[in-house]
Image (cartoon, rainbow, N blue to C red):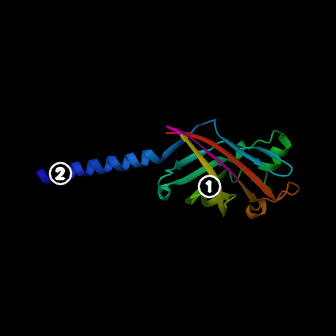
């Protein structure tokens, strides 16, 4: 009987420790406080609907990961015609591909912050990307900030006249 009790106590302690570790890594995106901006040579705007899982521990990057999406239908350039073109079949085709997805495969530290390497999926086309970012933490709150570029042709974004490079700026406040 004592063996069973000792095993049960050990299992409870292990489960509680595992839950505490996952909780310590898990950051919640502050809804309506984040910013996902994009810009090209002829258009700029924002995308909303950021949801997903952010697990980040600056002291143990091997257990950290990002698995997030944004809602393509929320794209807003401030111009109705540009919105229709951006969401249309020749560019993002929001009715067929309503989300953009990023899933990290590795997070490393460098001299200016961190780099998240992973797959960015737009229109069911996945490409390897590296997203440099910083992480600023104060207690149970933090901010992830990043800036990177993609080539629209890599994702078959065929609308001409906007330039090939799309710059993406991220400012993501989070809390525990």
Quarter of the view holding residue 89: bottom right
Magenta-highlighted residues: 138-147
Q: Nearer the viewer, residue 149 or 47?
A: 149
Q: Is residue 141 magenta?
A: yes
Q: Is residue 4 visible?
A: yes
Q: Nearer the viewer, residue 99 or 12?
A: 12
**In this rendering, which labeled residue sits more in front, label 2 or label 1?**
2
Q: Residue furthest right?
A: 161
Q: Position of residue 123 (x, y in %)?
A: 70, 58
Left of 84 or right of it: where is 6?
left
Q: Is residue 94 visible?
A: no
Write down the residue under mark 2. 6
* Residue at image point 87% right, 58% down: 160
* Residue at image point 72% right, 50% down: 168
As helix, strand or loop, the secondary structure at mark 2 comes to helix
* Residue at image point 49% right, 38% down: 140
* Residue at image point 14% right, 54% down: 3
Q: Nearer the viewer, residue 20 or 101?
A: 20
Q: Alpha-carbon neighbours of circle 2 within 10 Å: few (<14), some, or many (≥20)?
A: few
Q: Residue furthest left?
A: 1
Q: Position of residue 9 (x, y in %)?
A: 22, 48
Q: Nearer the viewer, residue 144 or 160?
A: 144
Write down the residue under mark 1. 102
């Amino acid at each position: 009987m004592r063996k069973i009790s000792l095993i049960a106590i050990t299992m409870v302690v292990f489960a509680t420790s595992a839950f505490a570790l996952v909780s310590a890594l898990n950051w919640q995106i502050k809804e309506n406080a984040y910013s996902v901006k994009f810009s090209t040579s002829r258009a700029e705007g924002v995308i909303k609907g950021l949801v997903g899982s952010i697990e980040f521990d600056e002291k143990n990057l091997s257990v950290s990961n990002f698995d997030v999406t944004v809602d393509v239908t929320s794209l807003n350039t401030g111009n109705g015609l540009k919105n229709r073109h951006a969401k249309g079949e020749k560019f993002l085709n929001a009715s067929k591909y309503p989300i953009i997805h990023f899933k990290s495969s590795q997070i490393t530290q460098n001299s200016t912050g961190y780099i998240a390497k992973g797959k960015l999926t737009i229109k069911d086309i996945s490409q390897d990307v590296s997203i440099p970012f910083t992480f600023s933490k104060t207690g149970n709150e933090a901010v992830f900030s990043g800036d990177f570029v993609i080539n629209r042709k890599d994702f078959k974004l065929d609308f001409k006249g906007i330039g090939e490079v799309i710059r993406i700026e991220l400012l993501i406040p989070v809390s525990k």
